[in-house]
Amino acid sequence: MKRLKLLLPLALIALVFSQLTVAEHHEKDAMKEKMASMTHLVITHEVKDADHWLAAWQGEDSRHKLFKANGAAHVHTLQDPDNPNMTGLIIAVADMDALTAMLESEEGQAAAAADGVKPETMKMLVQAK
């Protein structure tokens, strides 16, 4: 009986944690499905100063905030290890129209210029369907 009294609370704790884990798995699966249904882009470009460009993507008021407000669900920054000024982005896009409008807007152009992006080097690859 003592063993049962000791095992019962442990079994309940294990059950609670296993349910949390199941819920977390469902949440992760839902996020994976959502991300898989989005359009993904790769944008490459050269910048004048890689450290300056990377700094624009860090902190609370970073370019992540601008992109998220304009249709990008998630952005990864990339950098060529052999040529640090060759940079890029992988973007999961929830609203392609909004992101395109921002990139073409005065605000988007000004942000790119402020970050030292060389616009003539920019290339965009869109996920093939």
Image: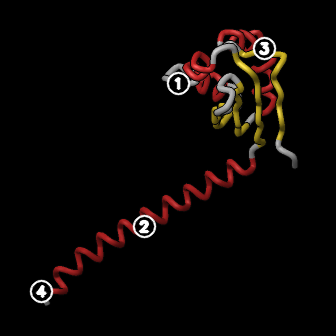
Residue drawn at (71%, 30%), measured in percent from left and top? 88
Q: Nearer the viewer, mark 2 or mark 1?
A: 1
Task: Kindly report the distance in space between the C-alpha atoms of the residues bearing marks 2 and 1.
Answer: 36 Å
Going by the numbered disc 1, the residue's amino acid type is Gln
As displayed, is residue 86 above or below residue 18? above
Q: Nearer the viewer, mark 4 or mark 1?
A: 1
**Residue under pointer 2:** 19
Going by the numbered disc 4, the residue's amino acid type is Lys
| Residue 8: image location, x then y, percent | 23, 79
Residue drawn at (70%, 37%), measured in percent from left and top? 90
**Residue under pointer 4:** 2
Q: Is residue 62 left or right of residue 97?
A: left
Q: Check if mark 1's residue and mark 3's residue have beta carbons within 8 Å.
A: no
Q: Check if mark 3's residue and mark 2's residue have beta carbons within 8 Å.
A: no
| Residue 68: image location, x then y, percent | 64, 29
Task: Kindly report the distance in space between the C-alpha atoms of the residues bearing marks 2 and 4.
Answer: 26 Å
**Residue under pointer 3:** 105
Mark 1: secondary structure: loop
Q: Nearer the viewer, mark 3 or mark 2?
A: 3
Crowding around mark 4 (Cα neighbors within 10 Å: few <14, some 14 to 19, many 20+) is few
| Residue 124: image location, x then y, percent | 83, 31
As displayed, is residue 126 above or below residue 15? above
Mark 3: secondary structure: loop
Most extreme residue toward the right is 129
- Rendered image: mark on residue 58: 1
Task: Kindly report the distance in space between the C-alpha atoms of the residues bearing marks 4 and 3.
Answer: 72 Å
